[in-house]
Image (cartoon, rainbow, N blue to C red):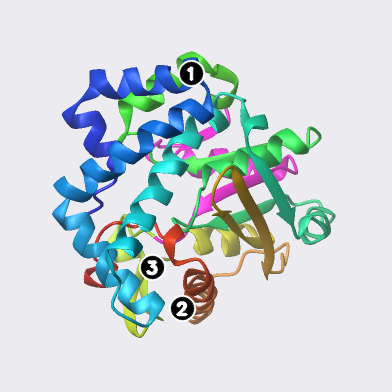
Amino acid sequence: MSTSWTRTAERGHPVAYRLMLRTALLLGRPLSRLFLVPITAYFLATAPRARRASRRFLRRALGRAPGPGDLWRHFFYFASTLLDRVYLLTGRQRALRIAMHGQAELDRALAQGRGCLLLGSHLGSFEVLRALGVARRDLAVKVVMETKQTPVVDTLLRQLNPEVARTVIPLEAPDSLLQVRDSLEDGGVVGLLGDRVVNEQRSAAAPFLGRNASFPTGPLHIARRLGVPVLLFFGLYRGGNRYEIRFEPFLEGTGAPQEDAMDLGRDVARYAARLEEQARRHPYNWFNFYDFWNG
């Protein structure tokens, strides 16, 4: 369902995509950002499904009909975070100014000694979570990600930075849950995305921007199954080279397994409510470029 530009670029122009990544590393961020203008214009002109999805989302989030400038800003923000992904995944995040808020909440959760799950979303950059691992050398940070969808970029970035590649837990791996459990038992941090449904049988509907949408129950099921604390994570792009990381307490770790369908439903509704609030505050950070309410 997603019309992510990374998938489109890889499948349609894999050589060009490799060239773009290497150019970003060769020229550096200031010069590379000049290419974002024609790239944004190209996708605005040639991606009608993403354009329609952008318009529908912005109408709900802004509470008004979005104009051409709104669509441009939405697409340009996404293009900017894709470029910055290169620097984050190759250890060159010094080109970015990243402010962190809520680290005390993270420390409090980790003090329980059971690790911590960070529940993120496609609002902003999930990759900026890498900055936490750089800032906190004493902390093991891993991310659960779908790698089959972007094989070109994942292969290239593994070649550029094998150390970063080792921090990824592939979502499709048969032992992904075991890797998550082991990382948490070692007192580490594991980041997951909580706003895109992979399996409709493991999803729940919740109000989001005036209409029900489907959200996955898997991440919250894992948290309750393992009895670990959960914090919400938002990696918001604020324009230029500025990012803002926010941690919010969400679930206290009980230390014991809990499996209650009603609890899961309430958890999903609470997550959707917090995501909605942030989406209204930062609408141009919404990077689910498909009709979110058709799921």
- Disc 2 crowd rating (10 Å Cα; few below 14, some 14-19, many 20+) is some
Question: What's the residue type where badge 1 is placed?
Answer: Leu
The residue carrying mark 2 is 265
Q: Residue at x 54, y 17 (%)?
A: 162
Mark in the foreground, 2 or 1 = 1
Quadrant that contains the C terminus: bottom left
Q: Which residue reaches farthest bottom?
A: 210
- Disc 1 crowd rating (10 Å Cα; few below 14, some 14-19, many 20+) is few
Q: Quadrant of residue 195?
A: bottom left
**Marker count (numbered):** 3
101 lies left or right of 31: right
Q: Is 14 drawn above or below residue 219 in the view shown?
A: above
Residue 288, horizontal then vertical, whole percent: 34, 57
Residue 157, horizontal then vertical, whole percent: 46, 22
Q: Is 67 drawn above or below residue 162 in the view shown?
A: below
Residue 133, horizontal then vertical, whole percent: 70, 36
Q: Residue at x 52, y 51 (%)?
A: 192
Q: Which range of residues does the magenta coloring cover?
A: 166-195
Q: Earlier in the sequence, mark 2 or mark 1?
A: 1
Quadrant that contains the N terminus: bottom left
Q: Is residue 218 visible?
A: no
Give the alpha-carbon distance from disc 3 to disc 1, as whole Å: 39 Å
Mark in the foreground, 3 or 1 = 1
The residue carrying mark 1 is 27
Give the alpha-carbon distance from disc 2 to disc 3, as whole Å: 10 Å
Q: Residue at x 24, y 23 (%)?
A: 14
290 lies left or right of 33: left
> Which type of secondary structure does the marked residue at label 3 adopt?
strand
Give the alpha-carbon distance from disc 2 to disc 1, as whole Å: 48 Å
Asked whether 18 falls inside the magenta stretch, the response is: no
